[in-house]
Amino acid sequence: MKLHGVDFTSAPTRRKCITIASGTLHVDVLQLQTLTSLSEFAAFETWLRQPGPWLAGFDLPFSLPRELVEHLGWPTNWQSLMRHLQSLSRADMRLQFKAFCDARPAGNKFAHRAADFPAGSSPSMKWVNPPVAYMLHAGAPRLLDAGVSLPGMHDGDLQRIALEAYPGMVARSITKASYKSDDKAKQTPERRQARVQIIEALEAGRTPWNIRLDVTQFRNELIEDGSADLLDAVLCLLLAAWGWQRREQNYGLPIFDALEGWIVGA
């Protein structure tokens, strides 16, 4: 099975690409085979439509909290919700989310999905620091359009499997230190050392997911990428491999709300 990890961005450019790490799993050793950068959505859409079999972990939220969706009166079926999001501009979506937050007390502004708590992920309705709502808006409808299958959420092509992944969950299981920044001035030796620490732990299999990573010729490239887009794609690849190991148990996913989705490995 071809496995992929996708570090997604809501506004791909040549400077900030959608980054894909690809490899294969041999028992509990994950071999990293290629790193790919896509600078435009058209290339990403073509990539999504490549024939299977493949399974990929995507660093983007697949849906919104049920609490928010019901409050706004939006469709509570995932496919219909994605079509509704496609009908909204990013600005319109943000205004509705902001109005929701403005009406709530301090300390409880955002609604959360159930998976946010075990994964430690940001609310998928958040539009700043990080703007994951924009990632959802740009990414999840494209998964629907491409016809991929989202286990427990949407039945598509069973030869192309998409799982939601969160690289920060893996990184924080190794170190709480910051390991990345898109600002070159903040790409410090300390962050570089944190990337080294993460890679060493992955190579040794010292994570709760118990998969050893073989980075082959890419080790130095992963260390020197101060944005850590490459490393984040690899962390998503590791979660995809963990899910593939549990393909007979619904990819390790628990029973979850099919509207909200779940983060693999959480």
Image (cartoon, helix red, strand yellow):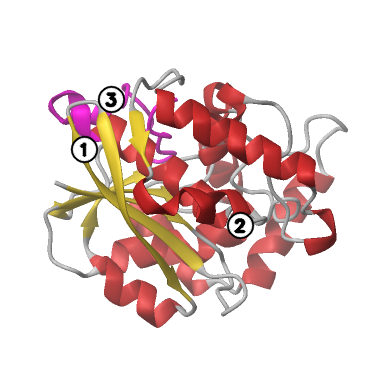
- Disc 2 residue type (three-letter): Asp
Q: Position of residue 261 (x, y in %)?
A: 40, 38
Q: Residue at x 73, y 38 (%)?
A: 178
From the image, tell me which residue sits under label 1. Answer: 25
Whether tag 2 and tag 1 are in contact, CB under 8 A, the answer is no
Please provide the residue range marked out in magenta.
244-266
Q: Is residue 266 above or below residue 240?
A: above
- Spatial CA span between label 3 and label 1: 16 Å
Query: Which secondary structure type mostly characterizes the magenta part of the structure?
Result: loop
Viewer-nearest residue: 30 or 98? 30
- Spatial CA span between label 3 and label 2: 31 Å
From the image, tell me which residue sits under label 3. Answer: 252
* In this rendering, the label closer to the viewer, 3 or 1: 1
Residue 210 occupies which quadrant of the picture? top left
- Disc 3 residue type (three-letter): Gly
Whether tag 3 and tag 1 are in contact, CB under 8 A, the answer is no
Are there few (<14), some (14-19), or many (20+) residues within 10 Å of tag 2?
some
* In this rendering, the label closer to the viewer, 3 or 2: 2
- Disc 1 residue type (three-letter): Leu
From the image, tell me which residue sits under label 2. Answer: 225
